[in-house]
Image: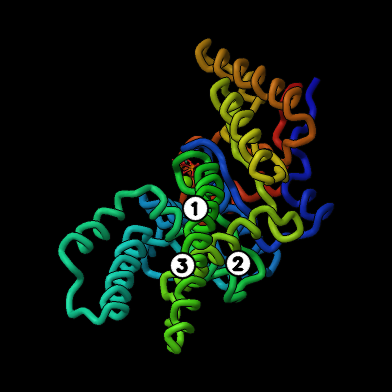
Amino acid sequence: MAELIGAGGLSRFFRQHGVPEIVIFAGKGGLGKTTSSASLAYHMAVNEGKQTLCFSTDPQASLSDIFERDFYGKGVIELLPRLHAVEIDADRRVADYQAQVKKKIMEMYGLDAVPKEIDEYIDSTSAEPAMYESATYDAMAELVAQRNFNLYVFDMPPFGHGVRMVAMADILSRWVDKITEARTKVAEYDAVAASLKGAKATEDLVLKELSSIRAKIKIFTDLITDRQRTAFFMVLIPERMAILDTERALQMFRDLGITLSGLVVNQVYPVEMLDAPGLSDFTRKRIEMQQRYVRQIHQQFGNAVVATVPMFPREPKGLAMIQEVAGYLMGEPTQQRV
Ligand SMILES: Nc1ncnc2c1ncn2[C@@H]1O[C@H](COP(=O)(O)OP(=O)(O)OP(=O)(O)O)[C@@H](O)[C@H]1O
Ligand SMILES: [Mg+2]
């Protein structure tokens, strides 16, 4: 039986649930997060008249690549009226942050230079994985707080589905809380000691810094767990590993308090291809295999599928193709046999 899957697309989802302020595309590497993000941002800006910002921290500059404009690390740029994009250079932000920390240390302790060991230690922190996430939370929180746009589309980085981004926020905030607790105790003792000596306690700059880091992480986690403000989609393809992976990721997201808004099934061979004359046995088998997994996705994830995007003969790049992908993402039906 031929039936329309994902008919209605994200358009229907937004009609039913309202257009959120933030849309996040997560999912395993290389299955279509950036393609979906760019397409949705394009659609909302061009067809729905919303001031839109498409945001990425992918070091491979994949947004620049798909929009065919080089804006990596160059701040927010306007691609078309209402369509804006920004590609954060997380490494540069980490370097700026390290420079700031060094400056603060010199100010706090009245030094002309940061001691060699501390300097080396701070430089070595750029290799820590949490630094990249930290820079990303910072950038996201900063942009959303400015409230210059009606819609923010967050394209998650290539590693760990974006799960790592969220999990790391959780770990980081616990860690910051622990240190803050210890530091608060120290500040209390300091205050008592100072009052005994008749002096005024000095402001704890470290504590201030910790609370500012905590606040930024909190803005990020609050945003992505807020169902009113944020819609959260996962992109997958009809293949076994992608299904298994999505299942695992969904469990992790549930544990972190994030509710899935829907699944986008990408790179699906149009089923009409099966009727094409001269179809090779190889291609027929691939299409049939995909159709089995499409069925499995529907059985397993029920109504979660909100859109199906077909496999294109070439990589979607440039505004004309982005517009075409957007059509499917928003609801143009593709024929599947279920
Ligand atoms: N429907 C499609 N048809 C054909 N090619 C596609 C389709 N969707 C995505 N691609 C191609 O597949 C590759 C991966 O897509 P994309 O960059 O959107 O994935 P991603 O999830 O953002 O990857 P990463 O995890 O590396 O960030 C790209 O080269 C893209 O052009
Ligand atoms: Mg990407």
Element class at badge 1? helix
Q: Distance between the residues labelled 1 and 3?
A: 17 Å
Instruction: Measuring from the top left, give residue 203's x and y in whole percent.
Output: 45, 80
- Residue type of the residue flagged with mark 1: Trp
Residue linked to disc 1 = 175
The amino acid type, in three-letter code, at marker 3 is Val
Q: Position of residue 183 (x, y in %)?
A: 47, 65
Q: Sequence order check: which comes first, mark 1 or mark 2? A: 2
> Which amino acid lies under the numbered mark 2 shown in the image of this protein?
Thr
Residue drawn where x is 50% and y is 13% of the image: 282
Distance Cα–Cα, label 3 vs label 2: 46 Å
Which residue matches tag 2? 52
Point 38% across, 59% down: residue:
90
Residue 249 or residue 296, whichever sits in front: 249
Location of residue 221 with respect to 26 vertically, above or below: below
Residue at (44, 55) in percent of width and height: 57
Mark 3 Cβ and ligand 1 under 8 Å apart:
no
Report x, y in % for residue 191: 49, 78
